[in-house]
Image (cartoon, coloured by chain):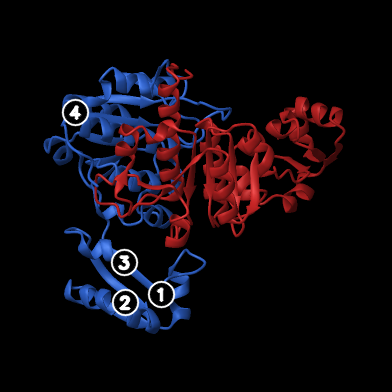
Chain colours: A blue, B red
Amino acid sequence: MREALAAPDGDVRVLFADQEAAARHADLVTAAHAAGAAVHIVAATALAPLTGTVTPQGLVAVCGARAAALAPVLAAGPRLLALLADVRDPGNAGTVIRTADAAGADAVVLTAGSVDPTNGKCVRASAGSLFHLPVVVDVPVEEAVAALRAAGLVVLAADGTATTDLPAAAADGLLDCPTAWLFGNEAWGLPAAVRELADHAVAVPIYGRAESLNLATAAAVCLYASAQAHAGARGEPPPR
Amino acid sequence: MREALAAPDGDVRVLFADQEAAARHADLVTAAHAAGAAVHIVAATALAPLTGTVTPQGLVAVCGARAAALAPVLAAGPRLLALLADVRDPGNAGTVIRTADAAGADAVVLTAGSVDPTNGKCVRASAGSLFHLPVVVDVPVEEAVAALRAAGLVVLAADGTATTDLPAAAADGLLDCPTAWLFGNEAWGLPAAVRELADHAVAVPIYGRAESLNLATAAAVCLYASAQAHAGARGEPPPR
């Protein structure tokens, strides 16, 4: 809510709040009203069917859909992007969006066939990050990879079976370039044909006995490795 | 299933399977029978109430609870542990167990007040890792930290507000020591009194605008930083 109201294109159109939440979050109600949203104070029982959660927070905002376009994202000279190919689980997608935001990524791109990031579970898992960085949807994967490469990004496929691993990629300076990480479906990963679109495939090493990492976890390790490589390449101290 | 049967203490006692799954996974049925489990082939409709999932896989195993004890874990000279304080969400706990396994951790310790790792959601999120490494439960946090420190582990609290961040900790060699990472509750993090039990507090840096990372994501970044520091300190190449 707060993130949607703060975002330049958050586009909050209607706000429903129960009495208790309206009192507790008076600043949000005022901000929504000031932003031109229609504000309705309703009974908590009327609010429940509008929410997908077991313990709703007493506020429901209706926002305009805000898909970003790929061209302006690429025109701005991005240094770090996450490209999700056929990611279906909204919780995973939302967590990757939150993690990409934390790692300083410039955008997240979801291919055609991926989950809609405005899915309620995805919005909640993103913890506001959906309103922090451009999220481009519905781009065919071949088209996305071609556009990213044309914009000067190295496309790295995250793939547990790759012969190059993440520490080796970092040591070789591969992560210092502007990078787009390509992540696959949570169940079946990246099909060979999609993996081969990338410039390189890189594995997160498995030091123990797990067969693999889950998607959001692997994405966190990869995106943070890039963020740290970029900060190091610029000679910058970390942000905190 | 496969992991439970392969684990020396997996302790599969009963296996229920529907006809279709029994045919598809004949090896598992045979292995369960050989391991002394009672095997029941039942109708798929009879199986459904035993599972917590929307799309059950046709196999349900009843396993003995297999909590590990802390003393033998510490006696074995662990180099990397994850200590979860008051972690309540079973999906988060299971994902951290899977990630700790992948990062080569020697064990996961859940404090008193944390979720039961035999919760079905936790078992599924762990993707078999619950059967790969010792998972110690129900240890009061003060007692756990004291025992870990007495065993020669440096206890690092993962805390977004810490003044030392992860790249700085790595650069200072802090991650080269045998380490226990202390992670807090998914909603409220580590209370000050618990954080102060640790030797140092370390923040995963936020390069973008996200307020924080989710627990499992932060744990992945921290545990992998330690795994890589340990591999580097031993002069070992990464595992793949």
What is the CA distance from the residue labelled 4 to the residue labelled 3? 42 Å
Amino acid at circle 1: Gly
Examine the rendered structure and indicate whether residue A74 appears above or below residue B65: above
Discs 4, 3: same chain = yes
Point out residue B63 in the picture as x, y percentages from the top left corner: 77, 42
Q: How many marks?
A: 4
Image coords of residue A192 (percent x, y): 43, 20
How far is the residue under mark 4 from the one under mark 1? 46 Å
Q: Which residue is mark 4?
A: A233
Q: Which mark is residue B29?
A: none
Marks 3 & 2, CB-CB < 8 Å contact: no
Secondary structure state at the residue bearing disc 1: loop
Q: Which residue is denoted by mark 2 in the rendering?
A: A25
Q: Which mark is residue A62?
A: 3
Label 4 is placed on what type of residue? Ala
**Chain-order first, disc 4 or disc 1:** 1
Chain letter of disc 1 in the image: A
* Label 2 vs label 1, nearer the camera: 2
Where on the picture, by quarter, is residue A14? bottom left
User: How far apart in space, not on screen, are marks 3 and 2 (Cα)?
Assistant: 17 Å
- What residue appears at the point 53 percent right and 30 percent down from the top-left corner? B104
Q: Residues within 10 Å of mark 2 (few under 14, many from 20)?
A: some
Q: Residues within 10 Å of mark 4 (few under 14, many from 20)?
A: few
Can you say which quadrant of the picture contains the N terminus of chain A? bottom left
Amino acid type shown at disc 3: Val
Kindly indicate whether the residue at mark 3 contacts the one at mark 1 (C-beta within 8 angstroms): no
Q: Between residue A190 and residue B141, name the one nearer to us.
A: B141
Asked if residue A125 lies left or right of residue A173, the reply is right
Disc sitting over residue A58 in the figure: 1
Task: Tell me the SS state at disc 2.
Answer: loop
